[in-house]
Amino acid sequence: NAGVTQTPKFQVLKTGQSMTLQCAQDMNHEYMSWYRQDPGMGLRLIHYSVGAGITDQGEVPNGYNVSRSTTEDFPLRLLSAAPSQTSVYFCASSRRLESEEGPFFGPGTRLTVL
Amino acid sequence: GQQLNQSPQSMFIQEGEDVSMNCTSSSIFNTWLWYKQDPGEGPVLLIALYKAGELTSNGRLTAQFGITRKDSFLNISASIPSDVGIYFCAGLKGANSKLTFGKGITLSVRP
């Protein structure tokens, strides 16, 4: 199993550009989520999905869109990038929302918006 | 959103020393998780705790689920240079809940 994979690993955007951060998991997990990590702020939940076709907002959803057309994939879209979205983004998955084994995290995408 | 409290933000220890870190909250959690994040990587689960008072070990790491269910502790014994990284606690309240994360403690180990 590859676990949770994320692409790209690094990305630089100009303000106003759009892009999609890719996330895939091969563990047949129902629950997938996106976090952003900023210095001194810890991990903050952006969006999550409890299954294909179902998504919901987390703590900091503004400026991001998600969709979940398959169990395996959960892309995160930035429609118009802003410098405030410079961050490290982690995708995670788990068997269920309240999984006691904790989510498995991907390696992260480091995004800089100029 | 609610955060779990982890302090200090950074800790510096000498190789071979033991180190303890705690995670506190004003509310009760039913599951406590401890993650480690190596530089440039995603967080990896170290230990999961499911019962109040539970003490669980993973090699040189030992974690405890506080009796009040409002805190948890992680101890690393005989630290080595590869212990450097960010240690996060996370709590889960129950069915249909989402994880709450602490802000993490950055551990540095001097050789």
Image: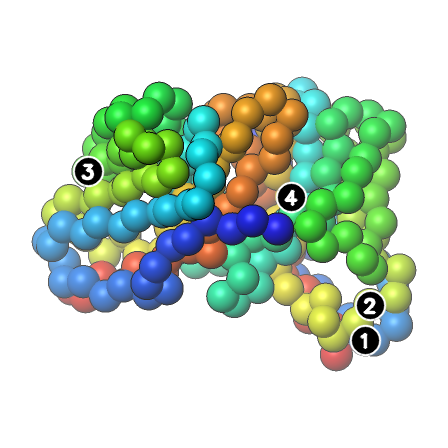
Question: Foreground mark, 1 or 3?
Answer: 3
Does any portion of residue A78 appear in the rendered image? yes
- Which corner quadrant of the image does residue A93 belong to? top right
Which quarter shows the N terminus of chain A?
A: top right
Looking at the image, is A14 positioned above or below residue B23? below
Q: Amino acid at mark 4?
A: Cys
Nearest to N terminus: mark 4 or mark 1: 1
Count neighbours of disc 3 (C-alpha within 10 A) and say few if under 14, some if 14 to 19, many if 20 or more: few
The numbered dot on residue A81 is: 2
Quickly name the residue at label 1. A14
Q: Nearer the viewer, residue A55 or A92?
A: A55
Nearest to N terminus: mark 4 or mark 2: 2
Disc 1, SS: loop
The numbered dot on residue A91 is: 4
Does any portion of residue B45 appear in the rendered image? no
Disc 3, SS: loop
Question: Foreground mark, 2 or 1?
Answer: 2
Whether labels 1 and 3 belong to a single chain: the reply is no
CB under 8 Å between discs 4 and 2: no
